[in-house]
Image (cartoon, rainbow, N blue to C red):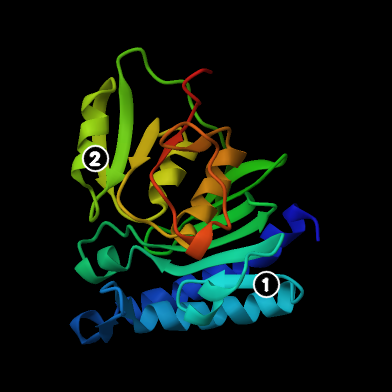
Amino acid sequence: MHLNALLDALRPVAYEAGQRIMAIYAMGQDMPSSAKGDGSPVTLADQAAEAIILEGLQRIAPHIAVISEENAASHHLAPPSQFFLVDPLDGTKEFLKRDGKGAFTVNIALIEQGVPVAGLVYAPALDRMFTGAVDIGAQESSKGRTQAMTTRAPSTGGLIAVASESHRDDQTNAWLSTHPIAQTTAIGSSLKFCLLAAGQADVYPRFSPTMEWDTAAGDAVLRSAGGVVTHADARMFEYGKPGYRNGAFVAWGRPPQA
């Protein structure tokens, strides 16, 4: 399936998952949640959205393996040459905060030979859907309007950085302090990648732990818009790592050498 056709097929799946998330969000304090073995939260919304996405992927591309956050058995699969990475509700902590920022997302990415070649990030509370595919470009759809996205050249007055709201650590602060940062915005979920892709920020450093399903969709959107994600030592970021676990990375709207 052509990547454009794949994204067209995935949009209604992500939208349905997002609407289910918002229906559960409307339950307010009665919304059930629990802790997984690693201490991270999981809610009925994570599980309901994942069921919708997995059913959709089985219908759209039954031959492609799926590695998803809430399917623990999939975490033990050896990464094939082509697979989906799914996080049905990225930013669960932000979802549970109910702070009105809407910084939680549905993430679906297609990986080929370790590279995120297509991705979709949907923020249902904000009605913003970001999509991207290599050699095609990136788009944002919101309130019935769709527009192309491209990263921006940094301002001579300094960089705008985005950083995790719930997982910011001393290493991130140290990195920010040694670079020409004019402003830092804290926000949850994969929206950080999307702000870079939309030309609203310049850099996103991350040193605290993440998993590949946390980053792949946003990474795909960013790369499609002209950005880049590297390991902390500037090597290109890849997927299918042991345990699908990420190390430190830096996402750039425009590579430093550009």
Q: Mark 2 highlights which residue?
A: 171
Residue 200, given in percent of the width and then of the height, sits at 40, 34
| Of the pair 54 and 256, the residue shown nearer to us | 256
Residue shown at 34% from the left, 63% from the top: 91
Q: Residues within 10 Å of mark 1 (few under 14, many from 20)?
A: some
Image quadrant in which you'd find residue 180? top left
Q: Of tags 1 and 2, which is closer to the observer?
A: 2
SS at badge 1: strand
For image coordinates 28% across by 23% down, the residue present is 179
Q: Is residue 72 left or right of residue 13?
A: left
Residue 190's place in the image compared with 44, above or below, is above
Q: Secondary structure at mark 2?
A: helix
- Are discs 1 and 2 less than 8 Å apart at CB? no
Give me the residue at 74% from left, 54% from top: 3
Give the vertical position of 133 relative to 69 (above or below).
Answer: above
Above or below, 207 relative to 24: above
Regarding residue 234, the answer to whether it shows in the image is yes
